[in-house]
Every structure is written in structure tokens, then in C-alpha cells.
Amino acid sequence: MEANKRRVYLDHAATTYVKPQVLEAMTPYFTEYFGNASSNHTYGHEAHAGMEKAREQVRKAINAQLPQEICFTGGGSESDNMVLKGIAEAYAKKGNHIITTAIEHHAILHSCEWLEKNRGCEVTYLPVDAEGRVTPEQVEAAIKPNTILVSVMFANNEIGTLEPIREIGEVCHKHGVLFHTDAVQAVGAVPVDVQAMNIDLLSMSAHKFYGPKGVGVLYIKKGVRMPSLIHGGAQERGRRAGTDNVPGMVGLGAAIELAVKNMPESAKRIAALRDKLMKGILERVPECRVNGSLTDRLPNNLNICFRYIESESILLGLDLEGIACSSGSACNSGSLDPSHVLLAIGLTHEQANGALRLTLGDGTTEEDIDYVLEKLPPVIERLRRMSPLYVA
């Protein structure tokens, strides 16, 4: 790519950069306060203090009752695996039925498949409507006497639709069933309150809200049993053995505190830019459609399908113009299959193969949006001229 070519990053759902304030908070724990947080001396105590400060920052950000309910993990996928496999083990005497949705992240879906195959669990995969939403009534109708867990994502990572989390949690508690939400895309973008929203277990990952990669959190409400899936030490109250990643934890704490503080202003600004981008594309490019809810949606997410062409070609054309975006989940970028999320909301294979996910962030400017609106339509037009399916 030419050195002077403009670069626009619209793939914040895949990952975000680490903000300077976050890196500044982390740096001393690589150098000055480098001790093992489990060591019983001053170096260890200093590291432990940083870790516990981060735990409290997370607790406040999601309104957990106790800092002990915050369990640090290696990221969102680990947190999701820990929930499903841990609850299946801890509550096996009560039942083996799990309820989830057809549009979950593959960390949930593949864990459910593993539990079905290797632990004899029964899993109900609820369908969603055309906007990607599941209803509390669907959840309630699926609950059985042997149901031990309901897992519904807070916000979809591809189409940005927000689920009715509080109402689903209320239904779960009414029937004495634990409720987990994969909130990896939601934390830092929209308000999350585990107490008000009836959430028992929640997954998050720091690199989605301007923190470092390789560190996440599993919120575990007091009283919920969670066995250790990694053995060898007593870290995280015996739930996750291994030397504590103190710099990562400190970075996560600083990032979530900053994200919550800036959320009202940031969400409003980003949503306005997203709406400008959406309006501009729909006006300039014929035969395209927006996927997901237009109202109950993450402020930074735009998922749009372009008829007659494939998303991989669009991505390549945009990358040559310095524009980075995606066709869906980065965790599934190597797959040639259409998005399971887009198929679940009723799109055909042909429509799903032409999807583009553009996700904005704190660094996105109005000039960035203008540049995309300048470069995207010619890319689409050029590709359509080459397509045997398209008739102008």
C-alpha cells in the first residue's frame, strides 16, 4: 500500500487498539511492579494490589455486588467455554438441558456441540426473527424440568442486534434456571448492569473496548457453583489455575473504567457517524440491504448485503483503497461457508455471501466516513460489472 494513502479502520468488532491511558496504566506492571501476585512479599503484594484494583473497576462497571464475583480469564472464548462446560459439570445432578440461540458466537455453539457429543447434554437452539432477536416467550416455552442454563448473547457480533436481556433473565429466574450472556460486543458500548438485568454469568474481553488482547472476565454471581477447568493452582478463588496476567488485568480494568465514563458521549457520536454511513450507502448503491435491527442495535455496527457479488472481493477492493472492514466474525474468517447468523435471519446463501460488516470506533472521524462513501460505490459497481449474475 502506498505510504501516503489514507487508512480507515472499520473493524472494531474484531479488535480495537489499546488506548494510551490503558497502556500507561499497564506499563509499571511490566517493569516496576513485576512480581507474581501470589507471592507473599512486597513485590507480590504490589502486583496483587494492581490486580484487585482492576477487579473492583470491573465490578463497578457492570454493577456486580462483590469483587469476588469477577473472575479473570484469557478472553471471551475462554469465558464462554468455562460457563458452559463448568455449569454442565457442576449442575449435572439437576439436569443436562441447555438453551441457547442459533446466532451465538462459535465459542458458545461449538462448546454446546462438544457437550452434546461428549457429555450427553441436550441443547435447544432457539431460532431468531428477521432482525436477529429471540423473545422471552421463546425462552420460557423451551425451559424444561432438567434445564440448567440459558445462554443468550447480549449483542450479536455480526449484525449488532441487542437482545431483551433483562426480560430473558427474569424468565430464567422465575423458573430457577441460571442465565448467562456473552456480552463481549456489548461491554463498553452499551450500559450493562448484571443486577438490574437478572444476569448470573457474563463474558467479556478487554480487546473489544480498547484494552489488551489475551485477557477477559467471567462474572459469576455469588452462589453459582463453578468448578475449575484448569488445574494446578489456587488463582481466581480456585477457578483458574495459572500465574496471574497482572498487566493484562490492570489494562482491562483501566479500559472498562474509561469506556463506561465516556460511553454516553462516545455512543452518541459513533451512532451518528454510523447512520451517516448507512444513509450514504443506501443512497449511492442500489440493491443492498441492512441486516439486523434498526433500533435495538449496537451504536457502532453496520452490516449490509450487496447483491450479485461476494464479500471477499469487496474486502479486497476496499483494502486496496486503505479501508479495513470484514465480512463477519474474525474468528470465522477462514471459513468459506456463509455466515450462520445471516442464514438464521432468513437470508439466502447468495445474499449472505455478499455481506459487509463495518464497525466504527472512538478513532473514527467524519472524514473517514466521507472517504468510505467516496470509495465504496465504485468498488461495488466495478465488481458487479464483472458478475454474471448482475444485469444493469
Image: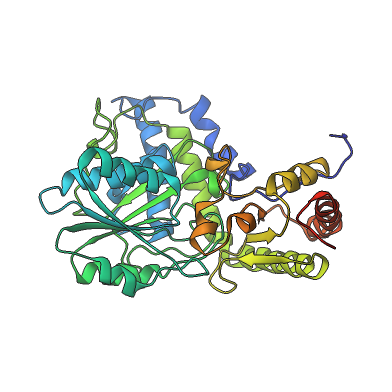
Which residue does the image show at 83% across and 44% down from the upper left? 321
In this view of the protein, can residue 227 be seen by the observer? no
Residue 183 location (% of width, % of height) = 44, 55
Above or below, 260 against 134 in this view is: above
What's the residue at 56%, 60% (across, down)?
159
Residue drawn 56% across the image and 66% down it: 292
By what rule are the colours in the image chosen? rainbow
Res. 259 visible in picture: yes
Residue 221 % position (x, y):
26, 55
Quarter-of-image position of residue 280: bottom right
* Residue 115 position in % (x across, y down): 27, 43
Question: Which residue occupies the foreground of this view, 210 or 369?
Answer: 369
Along the line of sight, the residue nearer the viewer: 365 or 261:
365
Judge by depth and name the residue closer to the eye, 35 or 352. 352
Q: Horizontal placement of 264 versus 2: left or right? A: left
Quadrant of the frame with the N terminus: top right
Residue plotted at (35% across, 30% down): 37
